[in-house]
Image (spheres, rainbow, N blue to C red):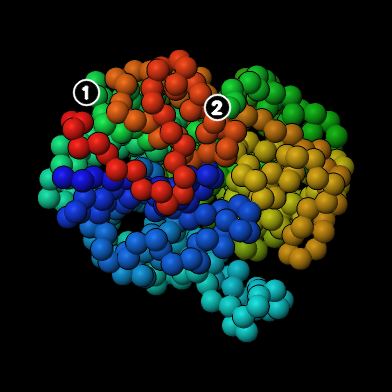
């Protein structure tokens, strides 16, 4: 039977993850992400989906980040009505993230209409809350480690990948062929989540690996974060940390708690200004309380009577008024706000307010995709465009990579090395330098046959391999 894999996204970029496995009778989509970053990439979200969504039998999600699940509402709107298989917290967090995304899409369309940015008289959002809710009805919560039939002769097994709550590597068995997807692979040593579980011992026909940091090693020493905060306090300004609402906010709060408890930094007010981050915090609290399988041993006992995320000065800004009021605070404080690449969300108005003042500091703690405001800041651009205006960058901008929830090049290789050599490996979900570096390392260090898939190119598996 002819079985093929086609990369419908994340083939030449870190966003828009979607891989389609097809047999003559079944189509399975692994991840269904939104393109983010550069305008030309975002524009791809508006293109017709490369296959008729109504012909897809099932979707499997590796995790809840927008670049892996953000297209689901549109897939449902365009006719997909199969099931979406994912772990419990992927389902919970995806709903939080997709509601927020729908809201941002609607707001952007309204803003474009008001300012006359769009070519269209009445610019429509990519999708709205109703579309998002429609896709939620298709979710099917699937436990970790349970081999689950998702279509005739097709099975999925999820294993914790240590990237965010709910995140998993995915083993798909389709008509006897084995496909392993790393999804986004986490790093050993997450303060709450178990280390990425090792790949299965049995050989796979295809391994699909991410390569976000395929050409880089996370080198920032851990003390860098405290040093930046103390330097900022000395300057008398405030600190803004654009952070992905899910996981990064949790990890940063735990790091701040530790630094404050140890007396390395003073106890200054810490604001989490993102309704999505605050909701996600509650799911993490629930997972810790319930000692979920993906929570590290001992964590639930350690935090049985204390909130792991409150360093004693945590304040939560839920409403827009509370968020805006943060602009008037003169006392040195830390504001953690989404989105992590400053592509949208409340962090944009904080940047607008804080960037012109040289006393302030912006600490970037995550991957910044090409074309995002975060990347422009990391690249040292003197002005950043926000709400149609150019804002001068006088604030100090620092990058701290020790909080990355992506395995770096060495960590990816160390994990992949545990798997028997597959028939073929595909390197996706990276910018070209990361993909090329990973492809070379897989070939030279592991003697794997590895390819960088071209977008939309169909790869047919050899019939004889099994
Ligand atoms: Zn991710």
> Residue at left 30%, top 26%?
422
Answer yes or no: is residue 297 visible. yes
Mark 1 closeness class: few <14, some 14–19, many ≥20 residues within 10 Å: few
- Image location of residue 277, percent across then percent down: 52, 49
User: Looking at the figure, which quarter contains the C terminus?
Assistant: top left
**224, 235: nearer the viewer:** 224
User: Looking at the figure, which quarter contains the N terminus?
Assistant: top left
With respect to residue 289, does 410 lie above or below? above
Per the model, the C-alpha gap separating discs 1 and 2 is: 26 Å
Classify residue 384 as left or right of residue 460.
right
- Image location of residue 12, percent across then percent down: 52, 44
Please tell me whether mark 1 sits on a helix, a strand or a loop.
Answer: loop
Please tell me whether mark 2 sits on a helix, a strand or a loop.
Answer: helix
Return the residue at label 2.
437
Mark 2 closeness class: few <14, some 14–19, many ≥20 residues within 10 Å: some
With respect to residue 210, does 440 lie above or below? above
Could you say which disc has been placed on residue 202 in the image? 1
**Disc 1 versus disc 2: nearer the observer:** 2
- Residue 331 lies in what quarter of the image? top right
**92, 279: nearer the viewer:** 92
Q: Earlier in the sequence, mark 1 or mark 2?
A: 1
**315, 327: nearer the viewer:** 327
- Residue 96 lies in what quarter of the image? bottom left
> Residue at left 47%, top 45%?
454
Cβ of mark 1 under 8 Å from ligand 1: the answer is no
Could you say which disc has been placed on residue 371 in the image? none
Q: Marks 2 and 1: in contact by CB < 8 Å?
A: no
> Residue at left 39%, top 56%?
95
């Amino acid at each position: 039977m002819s079985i093929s894999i086609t990369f419908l996204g994340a083939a030449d970029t870190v966003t828009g993850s979607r891989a389609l496995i097809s047999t003559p009778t079944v189509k399975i989509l692994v991840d269904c992400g939104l393109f983010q970053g550069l305008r030309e990439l975002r524009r791809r979200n508006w293109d017709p989906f490369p296959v008729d969504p109504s012909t897809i039998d099932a979707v499997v999600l590796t995790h809840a980040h927008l670049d892996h699940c953000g297209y689901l509402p549109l897939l449902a709107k365009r006719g997909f009505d199969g099931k979406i298989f994912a772990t419990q917290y992927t389902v919970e967090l995806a709903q939080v993230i997709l509601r927020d995304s729908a809201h941002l899409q609607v707001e952007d369309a309204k803003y474009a209409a008001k300012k006359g940015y769009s070519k269209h008289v009445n610019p429509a959002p990519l999708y709205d809350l109703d579309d998002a809710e429609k896709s939620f009805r298709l979710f099917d919560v699937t436990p970790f480690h349970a081999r689950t039939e998702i279509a005739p002769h097709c099975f999925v097994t999820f294993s914790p990948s240590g990237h965010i709550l709910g995140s998993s590597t995915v083993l798909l068995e389709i008509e006897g062929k084995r496909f392993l997807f790393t999804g986004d692979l986490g790093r050993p040593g997450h303060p709450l989540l178990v280390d990425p579980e090792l790949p299965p011992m049995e050989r796979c026909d295809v391994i699909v690996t991410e390569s976000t940091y395929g050409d880089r090693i996370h080198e920032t020493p851990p003390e860098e974060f405290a040093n930046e905060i103390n330097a900022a306090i000395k300057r008398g300004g405030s600190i803004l940390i654009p952070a992905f609402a899910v996981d990064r906010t949790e990890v940063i709060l735990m790091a701040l708690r530790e630094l404050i408890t140890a007396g390395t930094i003073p106890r200054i007010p810490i604001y989490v200004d993102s309704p999505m981050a605050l909701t996600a915090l509650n799911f993490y609290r629930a997972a810790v309380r319930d000692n979920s399988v993906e929570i590290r041993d001992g964590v639930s006992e350690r935090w049985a009577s204390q909130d792991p995320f409150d360093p004693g000065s945590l304040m939560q800004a839920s409403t827009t008024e509370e968020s805006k009021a943060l602009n008037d605070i003169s006392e040195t404080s830390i504001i953690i706000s989404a989105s992590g690449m400053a592509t949208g969300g409340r962090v944009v108005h904080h940047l607008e307010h804080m960037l012109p003042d040289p006393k302030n500091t912006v600490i970037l703690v995550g991957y910044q995709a090409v074309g995002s405001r975060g990347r422009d800041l990391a690249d040292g651009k003197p002005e950043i465009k926000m709400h149609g205006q150019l804002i001068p960058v006088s604030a100090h901008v620092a990058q701290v990579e020790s909080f990355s929830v992506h395995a770096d090049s060495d960590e990816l290789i160390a994990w992949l090395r545990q798997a028997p050599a597959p028939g073929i490996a595909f390197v996706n979900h990276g910018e070209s330098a990361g993909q090329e570096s990973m492809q070379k390392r897989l070939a030279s260090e592991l003697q794997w046959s590895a390819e960088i898939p071209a977008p939309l190119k169909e790869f047919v598996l050899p019939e004889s391999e099994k």
